[in-house]
Image (cartoon, rainbow, N blue to C red):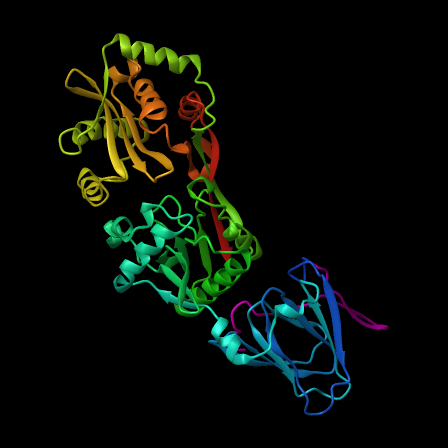
């Protein structure tokens, strides 16, 4: 059989056969992939007549020929196929946004339809021209869309500068970009930062970023997200031959308005949790008190005469990087994700978003924090302290200054994750330090969808 339009699939129902005959059955949220809210049946269709001839904006349906047979045409606006339905052991799933009609009924045919929603006349589209006008179109990003992409990020309710192409594309040589743009009525509705891992048949959103879920405007609603996910999966299957999508939602703290429509669409699309990182975040409007150990570190730094200063990306970055790289190599046998040259390039592109803050002992840099300023959220991309700084509370002084003074007017202060191996290992010492400033947990998730 040809590939069905997006979201459609044939469902095989269980069958029990003995000398008394055959029995097939279906259970809601199991064989039928939704809770059944409505059941209706079609029978006595005169020769030459058709049924259907519409699409639903919200309701999904499973159509089953319990007796006889008919031809069913399904159409998603881009792909159309006719399927012969003539077995009571098989049904066809019709998701929202797919046009269908039933024709060529055999005499005596009975068709049962299971629906995910109660009847709602306003949820039907009965005019095919109107239906085509309502369909999403999917466009793969290329450089000609750069300005449109960046403008949408800035106006969205959950975009950060990490999604600006000036940031995303600095390491474009490491990834095969397959970011998608979704249009409806000629207007950009959503964007997905993503890359293609051909050898694994996997779309990842996005391998070069900490998170990379749908970027959406304030107008985005749950039904739109369902349609976007359905179109995205169909595009990935048809255009790339993908069979897997790794999806990293944008943590809620980075949204300026509620923006978890994608999590519902993810659930409806069969997404399963694969990884869970734990970040530590301070709600700056409702700060919890610091632990005494952090206060003691601040006092120690003051007694040592340490000074917090705005770092210079030219003269101070390499000194800070020597500290950071030394710690990562000695403790974890790793290098920083970025090089000094890459960070200087990114800071030159985003001078108001990427900042270095340091602690000095005289002229010597003994600790530092590289900050990614997202607007209402401040993220510590890198933190490091020399042995001298560690023994004299340098990071305690620096972080206290950033939290209570420099960025006190922001909403959240995000320290980043303290987990490794997809969340299987928690660095308890690291998270204890962050929680000592009053930070508490926010998860960074990765989901998997197989298709």
Whether residue 10 is visible = no
Q: Position of residue 339 (x, y in %)?
A: 21, 39
Where on the picture, by quarter, is residue 433? top left
Residue 7 among those drawn in magenta: yes
The range drawn in magenta is: 1-28
Q: Position of residue 150 (x, y in %)?
A: 30, 54
Residue 92 among those drawn in magenta: no
- Report the side of 322 relative to 301 (left or right): left
Q: Position of residue 26 (x, y in %)?
A: 73, 64
- Report the side of 429 relative to 308 (left or right): right
In the image shown, does 395 or 17 lie closer to the viewer? 395
Q: Is the residue 358 above or below the residue 54 in the image?
A: above
In the displayed orientation, state which residue is furthest to the bottom.
Answer: 47
In the image shown, does 368 or 186 lie closer to the viewer? 186
In the displayed orientation, state which residue is furthest to the top.
Answer: 303
Q: Position of residue 236 (x, y in %)?
A: 43, 64
Whether residue 157 is visible = yes
């Amino acid at each position: 059989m040809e590939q069905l339009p997006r979201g459609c699939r044939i469902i095989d129902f269980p069958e029990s056969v003995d000398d008394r005959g055959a029995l097939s059955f279906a259970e809601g949220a199991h064989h039928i992939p939704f809770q059944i809210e409505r059941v209706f049946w079609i029978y006595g269709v005169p020769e030459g007549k058709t049924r259907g001839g519409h699409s639903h904006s919200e309701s999904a349906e499973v159509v089953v020929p319990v007796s006889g047979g008919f031809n069913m045409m399904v159409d998603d606006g881009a792909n159309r196929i006719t399927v012969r339905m003539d077995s009571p052991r098989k049904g066809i799933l019709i998701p929202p946004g797919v046009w269908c009609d039933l024709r060529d009924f055999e005499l005596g045919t009975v068709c049962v339809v299971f629906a995910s929603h109660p009847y709602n006349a306003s949820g039907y589209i009965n005019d095919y021209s109107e239906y085509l006008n309502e369909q999403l179109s999917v466009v793969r990003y290329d450089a000609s869309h750069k300005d449109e992409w960046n403008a949408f990020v800035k106006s969205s309710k959950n975009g950060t500068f990490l999604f600006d192409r000036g940031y995303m594309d600095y390491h474009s040589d490491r990834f095969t970009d397959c970011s998608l743009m979704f249009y409806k009525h000629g207007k950009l509705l959503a964007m997905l930062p993503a890359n293609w891992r051909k050898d694994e048949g996997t779309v990842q959103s996005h391998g070069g970023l900490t998170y990379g879920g749908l970027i959406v405007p304030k107008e985005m609603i749950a039904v739109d997200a369902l349609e976007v996910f359905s179109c995205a999966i169909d595009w990935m299957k048809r255009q790339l031959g993908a069979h897997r999508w790794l999806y990293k939602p944008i943590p809620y703290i980075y949204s300026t308005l509620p923006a978890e429509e994608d999590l519902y669409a993810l659930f409806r699309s069969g997404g399963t949790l694969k990884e869970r990182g734990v970040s530590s975040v301070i709600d700056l409007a409702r700060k919890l008190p610091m632990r005494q150990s952090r206060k003691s570190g601040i006092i120690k730094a003051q007694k040592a005469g340490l000074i917090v200063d705005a770092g210079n990306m030219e003269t101070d970055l390499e000194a800070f990087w020597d500290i950071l790289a030394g710690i990562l190599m000695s403790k974890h046998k790793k290098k920083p994700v970025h090089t000094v040259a890459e960070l200087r390039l990114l800071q030159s592109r985003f001078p108001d978003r990427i900042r270095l803050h340091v602690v000095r002992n005289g002229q010597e840099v003994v600790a530092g924090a590289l900050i990614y300023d997202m607007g209402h959220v401040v993220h510590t991309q890198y933190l490091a302290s020399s042995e001298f700084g560690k023994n004299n509370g340098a990071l305690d002084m620096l972080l206290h200054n950033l939290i209570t003074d420099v960025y006190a007017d922001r909403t959240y202060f995000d320290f980043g994750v303290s987990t490794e191996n997809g969340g299987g290992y928690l660095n308890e010492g690291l998270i204890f330090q962050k929680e000592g400033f009053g930070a508490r947990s926010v998860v960074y998730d990765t989901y998997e969808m197989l298709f």
